[in-house]
Image: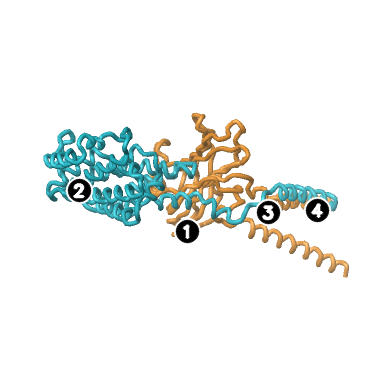
Chain colours: A cyan, B orange
Amino acid sequence: MKVVFIVIGFIFIIFFMLNRCSHQELPANTQDSNNPIAQRQDILDQIVLLQPLKQYASKDYESIQQTANGVVNVNEIEASVSSTLWWKLREIIEKKADDEGQRLWANAYLQQLYDAKRKGDCFPISFPLYSKTSPQQRRALLSQNTQQQSSEALTYILTHNGKRSVVDRMQAPEAWSQVADKLRQDYGAEADLINSGETAEDKNKQCEVVVRTFEYILSLPQEQQGPVIRWFLDKHISIGIF
Amino acid sequence: MIKNLFLKQTSLKFLAVVFILVGLVACGKTTHEPKVGEYGEALVNSVRLTSSELEQLNQAVINKPKDTFDRPSVAIGFLGESNKNPYRFVIVAKGIAPNEGEVNLKWIGGVQSEASNGYQPQIFQSDDKHKYEMNEPVLLIASSDPFSISEQSNGVHYDVHAELMEASNIQFQSVEVQIWQGKGSLYSWTYYLKFLVILMIPIFAIYRLVSR
């Protein structure tokens, strides 16, 4: 009997030792440094324009979380999330926002343009649709104040439901002609740069035209601003995720 | 005198066996969240369900879906690398037991590569037989068997799906779905020790019978 026990014990020790010897020692803090949930949340928390949704639009935020959860490679989460968020914010800012919300957003967007122009790289903000810039790169173009202002404008939009001007997408509001006239006076044929997107050769001039357009729109009398902003935001994409 | 000595030795042996068994039971089984090394060496991916997904699960516990296709499901993806075999899929469910008694949780699912149309279904369930008090916190861990991917499938995207098959006496508060990679503690010393004890007990019993 003793022999049986010794043999079984011996087998046990061999198995145990084999397992021990083939066991890879894991570096310390493996669990902390490799926590996909925390990594994902970190990425989401860095996206400034997502935070108002987290607080005031939980359903939309959840769908963004689900988008992030579906991405396997951590490096691709930001791109995937910002694409989903971009479509959501376009729906919210261009369609659901009331006139005051859109005015606040247009003001914040103008600040974004100023910041980016100062940094010498306006295109990612003036034409976010065409620019292949990451949210992180866009954030680097914007001051903290501008990021905050944009976030507050979005918060206003999510929490208010005021008057919405009715505009015909195909028909420019009357007050637009004042803006267009001024742009023609300032830039002549170059005023059309606002419609040329990524094909414009002089991106600085193009940025200037976009900036000036928003300045003229926002300097219209308050009662004329609503329809013009609504009509123009439908034409010119002003949302870049950062 | 000799008889007393024999009795003393037998009692000591008996006590030693009892201590070992109690020790094994105490060390071997306490429910806790998966730690590094238990289900694998590294956590490849992990997803916490959102509140609407949790709501769906809780709804399915109360009103059991009549149609198989209405069962709420969870999923998680990962990129297969054969040098990181084996993989394991783990569901960590936390919540409370609304009533007194046992909690039951059973999932059905499987691993599917982006190149395949279906998967071989298997049951994932925790073997929790604990009788819970009303509103007692519950932590259930359900895991798949370890599975490996072939060298040809390196870099292929895999998804693990699991549908809630049966659930009773649980109100979910959080559900986390995880993919672990590498050898887990299924091969740890406690596993071998338990195996050894299980093997030794019948051998010892047979020996005692035969020696009489």
Q: Position of residue B23 (x, y in %)?
A: 67, 61
Q: Which residue is mark 2?
A: A98
Q: What's the chain of the residue with tag 2?
A: A
Closer-to-camera residue (B148/B128): B148
Q: Assign a secondary structure to mark 4.
A: helix
Q: Are marks 2 and 4 in contact (CB under 8 Å)?
A: no
Distance from label 4 to label 3 (Cα)?
26 Å
Q: Chain of mark 1?
A: B
Kindly identify the amino acid type of the residue bearing the numbered disc 1: Pro
- Element type at marker 3? helix
| Residue for badge 3 | B190
In the rendered structure, the answer to whether residue B36 lies left or right of residue B14 reads left
Return the disc, 4 or 1, that comes first in the chain's sequence. Answer: 1
Which mark lies nearer to you, 1 or 3?
3
Q: Check disc 4 and report the residue beneath it.
A: B208
* Chain at numbered mark 4: B
The percent coordinates of residue B57 (x first, y second) are: 41, 46
Mark 3 surroundings within 10 Å by alpha-carbon count, few (fewer than 14), some (14 through 19), many (20 or more): some
Q: Nearer the viewer, residue B208 or A124?
A: A124
Q: CA distance from mark 2 to mark 4?
A: 88 Å
Q: Amino acid at mark 2?
A: Asp
Please determine if labels 2 and 4 lie on a single subunit.
Answer: no
- Left or right placement of residue A233 versus residue A36 in this view: left
> Could you tell me residue B19's position as x and y percent?
71, 62
**From the viewer's perspective, is the residue at label 4 or at label 3 nearer?**
3
